[in-house]
Every structure is written in C-alpha cells, then in structure tokens.
C-alpha cells in the first residue's frame, strides 16, 4: 500500500480525520508550492508539515525559535515512531555529530534547528548534501519587524531561498495581522506562496472587560464561579505575580506564581504541577505559556493590559483548547494605557518602531473600550469579517446606552483651560468634585470658578467620562508633561457649544457584575 496522508495521520498520530484546511495544506506542500499557514494556537499547525515530512522522500528541516521546546517536540515525534532530531546550542558536540551522521545517511525525517544554528558554521553546506525536501518556518511572525515578536536572528531566513531555490517553504504562525503577513512573504522571498487562513474564531471563549478597579477583589468574586477550575492570571510585573499568588494562597486557593526570575528548575516544577492539576492557578508574566499543551484551562485573566491584540489573543487562546466553554477577563484602566505608553517611550527602539508599537497599543485600547461586540472587533483585526454579534461577550450581554454628554465635557474642558492646561487625571477630578486637599489648596485651584462644578458625579464616573473624551479626540494629553491634559481645536468647538459629544453611560461595577450574574 502506498503511503497516503490519511494513513500517515492515523498510523503516526492516531487521528481519523484531518481538521479543516490541514488536508489542503498538506496537498499544497506536497505539490512543491510555498505556503503561509495562519492558524490559532492549538489549531493543529504541526501536522501540516509533519505529515508531508513522512511522505516526502528526504529531509524536512523545521526552523523554530523555541530552543527549550525542541527537545519535547522531538521526543513526542519519536514516541510516534518518527525519526526526528534537533540541532541547537543546548546539546554536546558528540550528540551533534551523531545527529549529523543520521541526517547524512538519510535516516532522519525531521530535523529541528534554531535559525542561529542554521546560518552558522558549515550547516548550510551540510544541508545541501542531506536531501532537504521541505523547510518549515515555525512562529514565522518572528521574521517581521511589523510583528509583535521580531527576532533579529530570524532575519537570516531571507537568505533561505537564495541557498535553496528549489525547496518549498511552509511558514506557520498563530499571530499575524495583515501587514505582518505580507511582510513575512516578502522577507522569505516567497511572493507566490499560497496563504491558508483558518478561522481565528474561538466561539467557546467568553470575552469580558471590566474596569481595572479593586482588581483582586474582582478576581475573588470571579473565582467563586470557578472554584476548582484551572486558570491563568497574566500580570505585567514579576512583583504583581507574587503578590496576587500570595493573596490567593491566603484565601485557600492552590495558586503559584511563575516568572523569568525564578530558577529554571522551579519554573519547570510549577509548570508540571499545573499540567497535572496539582495546582489550580498560575499567576504569571508572559514568560508562561509558550508551547504549553494543557487543554482544560478554563479561564484566563489579564490583570494588566497586554501591549497588543496579537499577544492578547495568543494568551486568551490558552483557555478552552479542548473546545469546552472557557471565560476570559481583561482588566482595563486609563492607568494601564499610560504605563504601556511610558514603556514604549522609554524603550530603546527606533522612532519608527516606537510608532508601530503605539499604533498596536492603540488597537488594544480600542478593543478594551469598545461598545461594539468585542469578538467582531477581535476578528476584524485578524481580517475576518463577521456578520453577527457573538452573544458571548460583555457588550453583547450588556448593550451600552449613550447620552448627550456635552455639558459634562464642557465642565471638564473649562477646568482644564482654567488651570492653564497643567493638570492630569487625578487633579482634574479633584477640581471638578471640589476636593480641598493639600495639592489643590497649594495651587489655589479652590479659587477657580470651575471648582466643584462636577460634584454630582462620582470620581469613578469622571474617570470614565474623561477617558471617553480622550478616546474620542475632544482633548489631548501631553505624555512629556506629566500627562497633563491639553485643549485642541475640537475642545474649543465643544466649549463654544458648536459641537456636541455623545458619551456611553457609566455603569457602576457592582451593577455590571450583578447583571452579568443574572445571565
Ligand atoms: P499548533 O501548533 O497550531 O498550536 P498543534 O500542532 O500543537 O497546534 O496541535 C494542537 C493539538 O491538536 C495537538 O494535541 C494535536 O495533536 C491535535 N491535532 C492536530 N491535528 C489533529 C487532527 N487532525 N485531529 C485531532 N487532533 C489533532
Ligand atoms: Zn459579542
């Protein structure tokens, strides 16, 4: 019997049928064409090059940036009876020799290699003698500086087609927006590649954004609905992971923190415990998750705002991989945006790169502040049009009401004008609400005619409306002047009554939660 792809799938991987697109992708690869595969995490990308590797008469070289994972991947393949090996800086000279011998003798079907290794020493010369029939570039977004995880060592791959013009390339990624996709093909010199795009929709994931106030308290009430289910809490700083994990431990949860500052053995141990359900909750920085194959993660919380939609989607994508329902929760406040913006400004990136990072952050912010179905916003970011609201996000469950907020905006804008555009969020709210604290008194702000004109609204309401004003562009913010608010031409139109402003009605947290719980 000749080896068919169906037979290979069944015999080596134990599956009866291909997932959507897998069969087509495999046929395309086998026909010798280049392709780009976009599939969410857990979608089944590996099969798309592993099955061809078994059917091709020669070697498939898999380029992957994740050296730490190569060993596991290769072991899993060997357990399935597939001849595979890896070459990277983590193995000894004699081990490398033995891998190279096997490759030379044609005893390997798959060889995993890091991009650094591929372009160092005599690897390329060797490869030419090893009958390479396919290159698979995993995590292909790393090649593009437009992506969210650019790795300079991936840039060497632009030379791949020069050395191997006749060997097809399959590039795979779970996260690439439109610009990044185009750039991947350009960088790989594979302009005619056929792009396969699996749906990014994960309808089993519920999407919720809540205002980032009293976050730990909100987490505790969230956990009442998930008392024993495994989940991940992502935090920006190592310190927060430790604080939150300790707090949850004190409340009786089996929680542990995980970040890159932990010694490697401790990290493996925590990861292992989570995989085996010995601990329920991992409180982690983004260091946690790459390549973790745990299918029953039932929820993911973002304690802080991720820097871009790609990262966010990848992280929530770790929940519900078994297809059963899972909940995701993102905390969002104005402060998170400021923190992220400052990180970009202070980073050592080129001006062009900073601009890109700001634009990506902005898209993340739009998602968090959306008053349209959040899934539609997410999917449109990945180029997927959706006809209907999803019914499984907080906006769908809780439609927003709008009202004429011109008067509110005028109060805030005139206070900004009176302070000569010198105040940031906290101070502005204190002026509007008429708080006589020391800072206010020392500036003489209590003497302003606008002092206390906004007493009727609570501080949190003001915070929300001022954020909405910023988002709709009726005022600006000066990041280099301690985030002081600035007036712009639109502000003046509003002040003069020449323009109106609609605001989305503020719903207190307790009420929002109560409504969610009714559903
Ligand atoms: P990705 O690399 O896209 O994140 P993987 O290739 O690791 O995803 O596949 C995710 C999971 O889906 C793995 O456990 C894999 O064995 C499984 N899988 C892949 N293809 C199929 C299939 N055709 N039928 C059933 N399970 C599959
Ligand atoms: Zn929705």
Image (cartoon, helix red, strand yellow):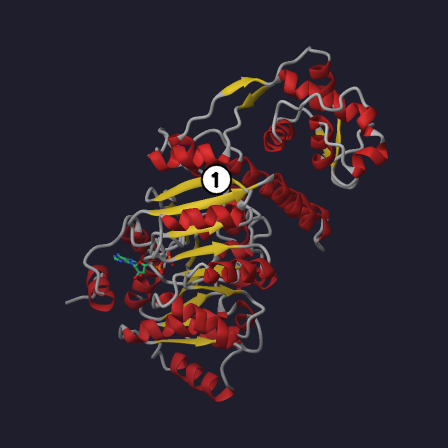
Residue at 54% of width from left, 35% of height from top?
366
Q: Is residue 284 left or right of residue 343?
A: left
Residue 105 shows in the view: yes
* Percent coordinates x, y for residue 123 in the rendering: 52, 76
- Vertical position of residue 264 compared to residue 457: above or below: below
Task: Report which quarter residue 500 is drawn in.
Answer: top right
Residue at 69% of width from left, 16% of height from top?
494
* Percent coordinates x, y for residue 31 in the rendering: 32, 55
Residue at 60% of width from left, 33% of height from top?
460
Task: Report which quarter residue 392 is drawn in.
Answer: top left
- Vertical position of residue 356 compared to residue 162: above or below: above
Q: Is residue 10 left or right of residue 129?
A: left
**Label 1 element class:** strand
Tally of marks: 1
Closest to the observer, 120 or 131: 120
* Percent coordinates x, y for residue 77 in the rendering: 32, 72
Task: Report which quarter residue 388 is drawn in.
Answer: top left
Closest to the observer, 370 or 399: 399
Sort mark 1 into few (<14), some (14-19) or many (20+) by Cα contacts within 10 Å.
many
């Amino acid at each position: 019997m000749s080896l068919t792809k169906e037979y290979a799938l069944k015999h080596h991987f134990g599956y009866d049928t291909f997932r959507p697109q897998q069969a087509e992708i495999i046929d395309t690869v086998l026909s010798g064409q280049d392709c780009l595969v976009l599939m969410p995490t857990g979608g089944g990308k590996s099969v798309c090059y592993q099955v061809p590797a078994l059917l091709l008469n020669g070697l498939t070289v898999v380029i992957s940036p994740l050296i730490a994972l190569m060993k596991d991947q290769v072991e899993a393949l060997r357990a399935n009876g597939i001849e595979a090996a890896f070459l990277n800086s983590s193995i000894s000279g004699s081990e490398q020799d033995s891998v190279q011998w096997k490759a030379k003798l044609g005893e390997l079907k798959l060889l995993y290699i890091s991009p650094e290794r591929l372009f160092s020493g005599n690897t390329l010369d060797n490869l030419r003698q090893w009958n390479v029939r396919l290159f698979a570039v995993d995590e292909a977004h790393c090649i593009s500086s437009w992506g969210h995880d650019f790795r300079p060592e991936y840039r060497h791959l632009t030379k791949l087609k020069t050395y191997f013009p006749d060997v097809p390339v399959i590039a795979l990624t779970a996260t690439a927006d439109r610009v990044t996709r185009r750039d991947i093909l350009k960088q790989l010199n594979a302009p005619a590649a056929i792009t396969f795009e699996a749906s990014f929709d994960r309808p089993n994931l519920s999407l919720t954004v809540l205002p980032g106030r009293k976050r730990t308290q909100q987490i505790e009430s969230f956990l009442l609905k998930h008392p024993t289910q495994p989940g991940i809490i992502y935090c920006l700083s190592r310190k927060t992971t430790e604080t939150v994990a300790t707090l949850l431990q004190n409340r009786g949860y089996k929680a542990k923190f995980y970040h890159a500052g932990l010694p490697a053995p401790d990290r493996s141990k925590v990861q292992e415990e989570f995989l085996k359900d010995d601990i329920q909750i991992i409180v982690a920085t983004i260091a946690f998750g790459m390549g973790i194959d745990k299918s029953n993660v039932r929820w993911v919380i973002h304690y802080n705002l991720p820097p871009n939609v790609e990262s966010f989607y990848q992280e929530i994508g770790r929940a519900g991989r078994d297809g059963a329902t899972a909940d995701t929760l993102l905390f969002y406040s104005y402060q998170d945006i400021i923190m992220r913006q400052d990180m970009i400004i202070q980073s050592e990136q080129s001006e062009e790169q900073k601009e890109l990072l700001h634009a990506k952050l902005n898209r993340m912010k739009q998602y968090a502040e959306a008053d349209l179905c959040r899934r539609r916003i997410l999917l449109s970011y990945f180029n997927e049009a959706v006809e209907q609201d999803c019914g499984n996000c907080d906006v769908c469950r809780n439609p927003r009401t709008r009202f004429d907020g011109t008067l509110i905006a005028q109060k805030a804008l005139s206070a900004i004008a009176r302070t000569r555009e010198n105040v940031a969020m906290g101070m502005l709210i204190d002026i509007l609400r008429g708080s006589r604290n020391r800072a206010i008194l020392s500036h003489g702000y209590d003497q302003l005619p606008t002092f206390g004109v906004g007493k009727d609204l609570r501080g949190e309401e003001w915070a929300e409306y001022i954020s909405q004003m910023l988002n709709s562009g009726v005022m600006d913010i000066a990041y280099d002047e301690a985030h002081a608010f600035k007036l712009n031409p639109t502000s003046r139109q509003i002040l003069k009554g020449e323009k109106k402003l609609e605001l989305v009605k503020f719903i207190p947290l307790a009420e929002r939660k109560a409504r969610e719980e009714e559903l």
